[in-house]
Amino acid sequence: MLNDKNTKVKSLWRYPVKSLLGEELQEIRVDLRGFEGDREFAVVNTQGRLGSGKNTRRFVQIDNLLSLSSRKQGNQFVVELPSGGSLPVLSRPLDDQLSEYLGQKVTVERESKVPHFDDGSVHIITTGGLSSLEKMIPKGQVDERRFRPNIVLDADFDDNQLLGKTIEVGSVRLEVTDKMRRCRMVTLEQRELLHAPEILKAITITGAVNFGVYARVISPGVMSCQSKIRILEGGR
């Protein structure tokens, strides 16, 4: 059984537009879908595929998405542009500027029939997992932002030890269901973080391209960086 006595929430993250940089939060409301507003929007090409760092049936690789960021401003979500300034999502001026910047026709659309999540709604990593990876590549700029988590737990264990556990964070209860399979996105440049292909190589060696875990929401509520943590066996 994991010792949760010293486990804390280190940080909370939301990404209003899928595959763009997001925002660090002190508190977040969580519903059965996941973090309120997380991946609620996505950049969509003319074939209806979602902009991402990879190519699949649902996703299409669009370069330079990580040079853009999204956040909540007042009562609306906005995208911050590399040239400065911000524009609200679901606006024609934003679609026009993104199409010009990305070199192809795109729109920003709200989630409907096609889910914006990859395979799970809440993504968790631990500082223990980050530390293990950093020991393998001390000059690799291992940073939590590369992995786009929702929750970073300050814990002395690796995230895969949470599989099958139920986690209580504040009034929210989560069931940890699966490992998270990684792609080239963890290696890409973003802000002061340089391109680092060695990170994906190290993950492949240690975890069969897995790093971090997915969880589903059992009980909605509110969590914060001051929330108490309880780790329970199974669904108890």
Image: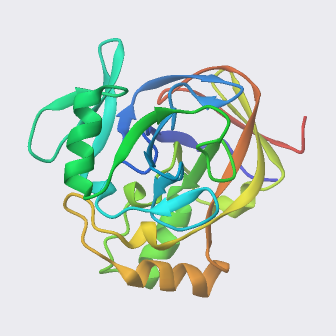
Q: Is residue 27 left or right of residue 97?
A: right
Q: Is residue 45 left or right of residue 169?
A: left
- Residue at 24% in and 71% down: 194
Q: Nearer the viewer, residue 150 or 168?
A: 150
Quarter of the image for residue 191 reads: bottom left
Query: Is residue 21 shown to the viewer in this render?
Result: no
**In the displayed image of the protein, which residue is found farthest to the left?**
83
Q: Nearer the viewer, residue 28 or 2?
A: 28
Query: Is residue 8 shown to the viewer in this render?
Result: yes
- Residue at 62% in and 82% down: 206
Q: Nearer the viewer, residue 123 or 73?
A: 73
Rendering coords of residue 99 (x, y %):
27, 48
Vertical relation: 179 (above or below) 207: above
Q: How is the image coloured?
A: rainbow
Vertical relation: 117 (above or below) 202: above
Q: Is residue 47 left or right of residue 159?
A: left
Q: Nearer the viewer, residue 78 or 171?
A: 78
Q: Quadrant of the C terminus?
A: top right
- Residue at 78% in and 56% down: 163
Vertical relation: 46 (above or below) 63: above
Rendering coords of residue 148 (x, y %):
46, 52
Rendering coords of residue 69 (x, y %):
29, 43
